[in-house]
Amino acid sequence: MNYNKLILSILFFLGVQFGWAQEKLSKQEAVDIALENNFDIRVTDNNVEAAKNSSSIYNSGYLPILSANGGALYDKSDNDNEFQDGSHQENTTTRHSYNASVGVNYLLFDGLGRKYNYKKLQDLYNLSEIQARQIVENTLLQLLASYYDVARLTENKSNQKQSLEISKSRLLREKYNYEYGQNTQLDVLNSEVDVNNDSIEYLNIGRELSNAKRDLNVVLGRGVNTDFTVDTLVNYALHLTYENLLSSARDNNALLLQAEKYVDLSEFDLKINQSGWMPIVGINGSYGWSNFDTESSTSNAFSLAAQTSTGINGGVNLSWNIFDGGTTKTRVQNAKIAIDNSNLEKQQIEQDLERNVANAWETYQNSLFILQAEKKNVQTNKRNFNRSEEQFQLGQIISVEFRLAQVNFLNAVNNYNKAKYAAKVAELRLLQLSGELLGADY
């Protein structure tokens, strides 16, 4: 007996230690981990950084181009000269030459194409930030939906465990009653079937919970088998109104903001193409230095022995493509069509957004109503179960009737859990459409 107690104590201690080691993951901690580790968000951050680099002054064409060149040459030649009288003269000539130059080119005017291209690059950077926000919102919505799914299954598992304990207690009671001749073996067999069914359901819920935790870990960007517990408390933003949400959606919705940016980009493309009708003016300048010297084994007073020269030059160049065969005109016409298409797409997104907000609001309101209805169902079924349990203990109802009350109560609790988390997810979807998800109470 003492040995068995020791083993049980050790197992209990290890179980407590395992429970302490399990991570308690709050909603805010999950959000913080996802923002840091989620792969989609990390890729998006890199894209934003690349767009930021592209929008800098170094990629604008506003800065001059400065270049430097230099060179050196060494030449040695041996000559054997034969004259008409048959005499020979050998000559060795060595030449050294060096040169260096610095040049600068700057575009003064290109028909304002450079100006609008720079603005377009800055708008592309702003667009990348809006796209990044959309990725973050989608990731957070996926994260929180997965988090609440884990919470729902956690509570379902706990409820199923309690129901299993009730079924086991009922089976034990039926066995005692059978031994004392107060019921038949059929009642025992029915109770055993119910215990087996509850055990199978408990295992299935445990499997679903493990899978849901792995899904959440993938969104968090960490080890898929990391175990944790979650917070099952849910708070609702009951101050929401349809008018305010719709107004916020028109101002802050990520898809609509992107559509507005695409309109701006199309207008910049038009101005960039129109700059092809304007002249291009540039300036350039350079400073050069060169040195040349020659050494010869035969002297010649009139041959050049060395030369050094320096010089500065500068100029202005102008080019004007007066007629390019209609290419610029075609690009301008197509740019105007692109602007029209961008505006049409924006109008369609505005219409879709108004519809989606209305649908999401109705879904949210229905979810809140269902939540209250399910809450009342839980209260009713709990009272029914408690009365049935008392009557079963007193032998006033049969086990089948008690089992029915037990199952009804369990289903009511699980339906309430489902409605509780479904209402919260519906609220988050509504907040995402209105552009208020990032600052919401999760």
Image: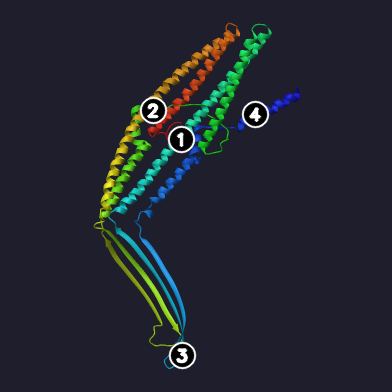
Q: Which residue is mark 2?
A: 360
Q: Residue at x 54, y 26 (%)?
A: 154
Mark 3 and mark 4 lie on one chain; the one further toward the N terminus is 4
The residue under label 1 is which amino acid type?
Leu
Question: Does the image show residue 170?
Answer: no
The residue under label 3 is which amino acid type?
His
**Cβ atoms under marks 1 and 4 closer than 8 Å:** no
Q: Residue farthest to the left? A: 322
Provide residue 179's location: percent of width, then percent of height: 68, 9
The residue under label 4 is which amino acid type?
Gly
Mark 3 and mark 2 lie on one chain; the one further toward the N terminus is 3
Mark 1 and mark 4 lie on one chain; the one further toward the N terminus is 4
- On screen, residue 405 versus residue 48, left or right, reads right
Q: Which residue is mark 3?
A: 88
> Cα distance, mark 4 to mark 2?
44 Å
Q: Quadrant of the N terminus?
A: top right
In this orientation, which residue lies closer to the viewer: 340 or 111?
A: 340
Which element is circle 3 on?
strand
Mark 4 and mark 2 lie on one chain; the one further toward the N terminus is 4
**Dot 1 alpha-carbon crowd within 10 angstroms: few under 14, some 14 to 19, many 20 or more:** many
> Cα distance, mark 3 to mark 2?
106 Å
Quarter-of-image position of residue 130? top left
> Cα distance, mark 1 to mark 4?
33 Å
Q: Which residue is mark 1?
A: 140
**Dot 2 alpha-carbon crowd within 10 angstroms: few under 14, some 14 to 19, many 20 or more:** many
The nearer-to-camera label among 3 and 2 is 3
Q: Residue at x 52, y 11 (%)?
A: 384
In this orientation, which residue lies closer to the viewer: 107 or 233?
A: 107
> Cα distance, mark 1 to mark 2?
18 Å
Residue 15 is labelled as 4
